[in-house]
Amino acid sequence: MLEKTDRIDVLIHQLTRLEEDLDKLDGEGREQTRAEVAAVRGQIVDVLITALREGDVFARRGAAYGLSKLPEARAVDVLIYALEDLDDSVRSWAAEALGTIGDERALAPLVRALKEENPYVAYSITHAIMKFPKDKVARAVMTALDSPDRNVRRRAAKLLGELKHKKAVPRLAALLGDADPQVRYEAVEALRKVGDIRALECLIAALADESTDVRYGAIQALRALGDRRAVEPLVRVCMENEDLRFYALQALKELCGEDAVRPVLEALEHLRSVVHAVAMRVLNERDQGVQRASG
C-alpha cells in the first residue's frame, strides 16, 4: 500500500510541476500545452474515481488519497459514497478530499458522518466540515443536535463551540439534560467557548451534575463568564466537593480576587475542626457504650 501511495505522490508531484511550469511558457504553444496537461489531469482523476468506486481496499485507499491531492468537483458523489466505506483510511481520505473541494453538496453527508466510531477518522470529518462557510456549517450542525446518535450530538455541540455560535446557546443549554454524560460535557465546553451570559443559570445547575467531568466543565465555564452570581454556587462546591475544590477556588480567585477567597479557606478550616470534634464525640459515645455493656 505504501508503494502505491508513493507512486501516486510522485505522479501528483509531476503533474503539479507541469501545471506550475505552464506559466513560464511563452508563445502560441502555451494554450495547447495547458489543454494537454488538463486532459492528463482529467484522465488521472477519472482513474482515481473508478478505483475508488470499484477497486479493492488498497486501490480505494490510494484513490481516496489521490483525490484529496487532486480536488475535483466531479469526484464529490463518489467521495460522499466513500464516507461509508468499511476501511478507516478510505473514509478519512474521502473526508479530507471533500473538505478540500468545498462543494456544499458534501456538507450534510459529512455532518451525518459525525457518527464515526474511529476518533482519527472523526477528526478528519470535523476538520473537513470546518472548511465550509461558517454560517452554513452552523445551520447544518444545529440540526444534528437532534440526532439519535450520541457521537453526532456531542461532535455537533463541539463544532458549535468552535464556531462560537451564539444562536446555538438555547439548544446547547437543552443538551445539558442529555442522557449521555459525554454529550453534556461537550455542551458545557461549547457554552464556555461561546461565552454568552444567557447560559449562566444552566451552568450553575450543571454544578450538580452526576458526572465529575460535567461539573468540572461547568466550573471552567462559569470562571470564563466572570459573572459574580456564580460566587455562591462555587463556594458551595468548595464546601461540598473535595475533588473539585481546587478548581472552584481558582474560579473564585478569578471572579473576586486572591484575598476574597480567605473566608472560604477559613470556613473550610472551621469545617475540618467541626468534623474532628464530632468524630471525637462519636468515638467517646462508642467507648462509653462499650463500658456500660461490659459493666
Image: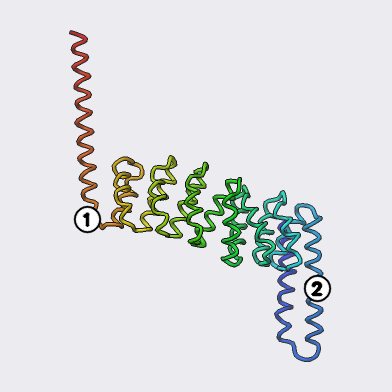
Q: Position of residue 100 (x, y in %)?
A: 65, 66
The label shown at residue 40 is: 2
* Quarter in which the N terminus is drawn: bottom right
Report the residue at 62% width, 61% height from top: 128
Q: Earlier in the sequence, mark 1 or mark 2?
A: 2
* Name of the residue lying farthest toward the top: 295
Quadrant occupied by the C terminus: top left
Quarter of the view holding residue 47: bottom right
The residue that appears at 23% across and 37% down in the rendered structure is 272
Q: How is the image coloured?
A: rainbow
Instruction: Judge from the rendering whether residue 135 lies leftward or rightward of residue 110; answer left or right.
Output: left
Where is residue 3? Give x, y as percent.
73, 59
Residue 158's place in the image compared with 209, above or below, is below
Left or right, 198 with respect to 61, comes to left
In the rendered image, residue 57, in percent from the top left (x then y), is placed at: 76, 52
Provide the residue designation for mark 1: 259
Q: 293 or 30: nearer the eye?
A: 293
Look at the numbered disc 1 and give the secondary structure of its residue.
helix
Q: Nearer the viewer, residue 100 or 39?
A: 100
Q: Is 37 located above or below residue 195 in the figure?
A: below
Residue drawn at (79%, 77%) of the image: 37
Q: Which mark is residue 243?
A: none
The amino acid on which the numbered mark 2 sits, given as a three-letter code, is Val
Question: Marks 1 and 2, Cα distance to the nearest angstrom?
Answer: 72 Å
Badge 1 crowding class, 10 Å Cα cut-off, few under 14, some 14 to 19, many 20 or more, is: few
* Type of amino acid at the residue the image marks with label 1: Asp
Q: Nearer the viewer, residue 44 or 21?
A: 44
Residue 216, percent across and down? 40, 48
- Number of residues whose C-alpha sits closer than 10 Å to that of mark 2, classed few (under 14), some (14–19) or many (20 or more): few
